[in-house]
Image: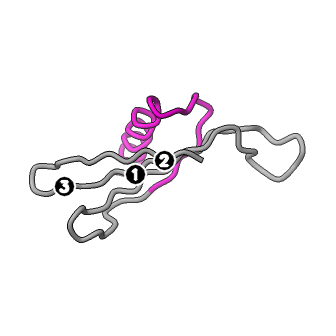
Amino acid sequence: MAELVVRHWNGRYAEIHTYRFATDLPLRADADAVLVNWCELRITKETAGTVLYQNAFVTTHPMNATTVMPIVRAGRTRWKAENE
């Protein structure tokens, strides 16, 4: 499992965006399970350390340190569109 930490200024205070991701994980416990890539985003307030947002995504897109941020952004956009 890999981790990427990015400090982000939202205009009022600093946030810490922590991306964790892993590749080629079995979707279930069977021997013939489909392999997927998993990522998680946790946003915390820098000063207080309180968690502002946390969510995880599963995808078949290639996952690495350069692609995890756009994949999470697309996942959050899709979630927002489907739930509002």
Of 20 and 56, the residue lying toward us: 20
Please name the residue shown 46% across and 30% down the image: 67
Q: Are marks 2 and 1 in contact (CB under 8 Å)?
A: yes
Left or right for 36, reference 38: right
Secondary element under disc 3, as helix, strand or loop, is strand
Cα distance in 3D space between marks 1 and 3: 13 Å
Please name the residue shown 62% across and 32% down the image: 60
Q: Which residue is mark 1?
A: 18
Q: Which residue is mark 2?
A: 3
Q: Which residue is mark 3?
A: 14
Of 2 and 12, the residue lying toward us: 2
Residue 55, numbered label: none
User: Could you say where residue 71 lies in the image, as x and y percent from the top left?
Assistant: 45, 35
Extent of the magenta region: 55-84
Secondary element under disc 1, as helix, strand or loop, is strand
Cα distance in 3D space between marks 3 and 2: 19 Å
Secondary element under disc 2, as helix, strand or loop, is strand
Q: Is residue 65 magenta?
A: yes
Cα distance in 3D space between marks 2 and 1: 7 Å
User: Could you say where residue 83 lies in the image, as x and y percent from the top left?
Assistant: 40, 51
Q: What amino acid is found at the position of numbered circle 2 in the picture?
A: Glu
User: Could you say where residue 22 lies in the image, as x and y percent from the top left?
Assistant: 61, 43
Please name the residue shown 38% across and 38% down the image: 73
Q: Residues within 10 Å of mark 1 (few under 14, many from 20)?
A: some
User: Could you say where residue 40 lies in the image, as x and y percent from the top left?
Assistant: 49, 50
Q: What amino acid is found at the position of numbered circle 3 in the picture?
A: Ala
